[in-house]
Amino acid sequence: MATAAPAHPTACLALADGSVFYGIGFGATGQTVAEMCFNTAMTGYQEIMTDPSYAGQIVTFTFPHIGNTGTTPEDDETADPVAAGMVVKWMPTEPSNWRAAQDLSAWLTARGRIAIGGIDTRRLTRAIRQQGAPHAALAHDPDGNFDVEALVAAARDFAGLEGMDLAKDVTCAQSYRWNEMRWAWPDGYAPQTEPKHKVVAIDYGAKRNILRCLASAGCDVTVLPATATYDDVMAHNPDGVFLSNGPGDPAATGAYAVPMINDVLDKTELPVFGICLGHQMLALALGARTIKMSHGHHGANHPVKDMDTGKVEITSMNHGFAVDSQSLPEGVVETHRSLFDGSNCGIRLENRPVYSVQHHPEASPGPQDSFYLFERFAEAMAAKA
């Protein structure tokens, strides 16, 4: 079924079930095919579009006013947008923010990302919730010429994210050092000048603000590619190992990531901390399973309960796979749980400083309730010193 088209539609979104949405295109022209997801965050659209965890996905924003604060290079989570496309309710307006360096449409155009506005995002979000994350084709043509049947066919031909190892597409090509700390008024990003702990961060698609949080917690961070081996890690003589966020099917990435993690766990007593895909990698290494979710968790308002303290934290999330809590082996404790659907959001290894969470404590965008996890990692390394 097709939605009512604007007078002169210049963009078209087609779902694999045959649904077609017409709207106004902005950003780059062309066509892209990906999985659809929706994000409920009211801020941080630039951080979301540049989050490597969104590789292979088109993001629908449920908040209608996207683009009104423009863009700034300071808010990029990686060098270029990773999300395949953007869907919004209202067309972006002229930016009104003192930090804005470029408007959203020009920013997307320069980076080759397609967007569509004028869409009934409530209807689209309901469809995603009811049928699961659909496969979709998004096209932008200023002349409004669309082969709708071909777009629907392209959406149906999309292989989907299950079985896809996307970490290898977004990881760094070679190792590098990171010393930039979190943004603070009035100086912005300041360098870490007195690091206390040497951390090796495995980059499965790491967000810059996660690395900044590590630096702000007193860490001297060396980032290694996703394919790093145990020997690669230990060559840096780390005090701790961090496992980053990232996209794709954790079981596929785990084929090469899990052996390294197992070696670290078996041969050392190093503290290990994982976030998002890193959480799933640690769970797989400990013997648990991961499962594909219906439509995943994407937003900055997700309540998570700390099972040890009973405290409820409002968190940022972005994941389409989850750790199956029923598969956690003996000696692995569930530490956090989603209050939306009861899914697993954290684990720890009994009697060892090895833990991970599914949510994003770096809060970019989102609340900062969970920043203590970085400090806990630093404290664990200090205790081992």
Image (tube, rainbow, N blue to C red):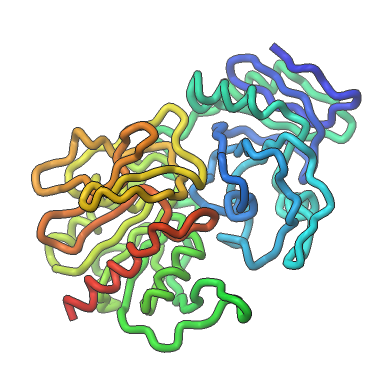
Is residue 119 among what the camera can see?
yes
Q: Which quadrant of the rendered structure holds the C terminus?
A: bottom left
**Residue 54: image location, x then y, percent:** 53, 45
Vertical arrangement, residue 362 with respect to residue 146, above or below: below
Pick the quarter of the image with the N terminus.
top right
Asked whether, in this view, residue 276 is left or right of residue 299, the answer is: left
- Asked whether 147 or 64 is in front, the reply is 64
Is 293 displayed left or right of 287 in the figure?
Answer: right
Q: Nearer the viewer, residue 92 or 277?
A: 92
The quarter of the displayed image where residue 58 is located: top right
Residue 256 at least partly seen: no
Q: Residue at x 22, y 67 (%)?
A: 271
Q: Single out the residue that lies furthest toward the bottom.
A: 194
Examine the image and state in which quarter residue 119 appears. top right
To which quarter of the image does residue 319 belong? top left
Q: Relative to residue 278, is residue 57 depicted above or below?
A: above
Q: How many marks?
A: 0
Q: Is 302 drawn above or below residue 110 in the view shown?
A: above
Return the x and y of residue 85 as percentages of the image width and height.
Answer: 65, 40
On the image, the x and y values in percent for residue 274 come to 32, 57
Q: Residue at x 72, y 43 (%)?
A: 65
Q: In the image, 312: left or right of 90?
A: left
Residue at 75 percent across and 51 percent down: it is 68
The x and y percentages for residue 280 are: 31, 46
Look at 23% across and 47% down and name the residue there. Answer: 307
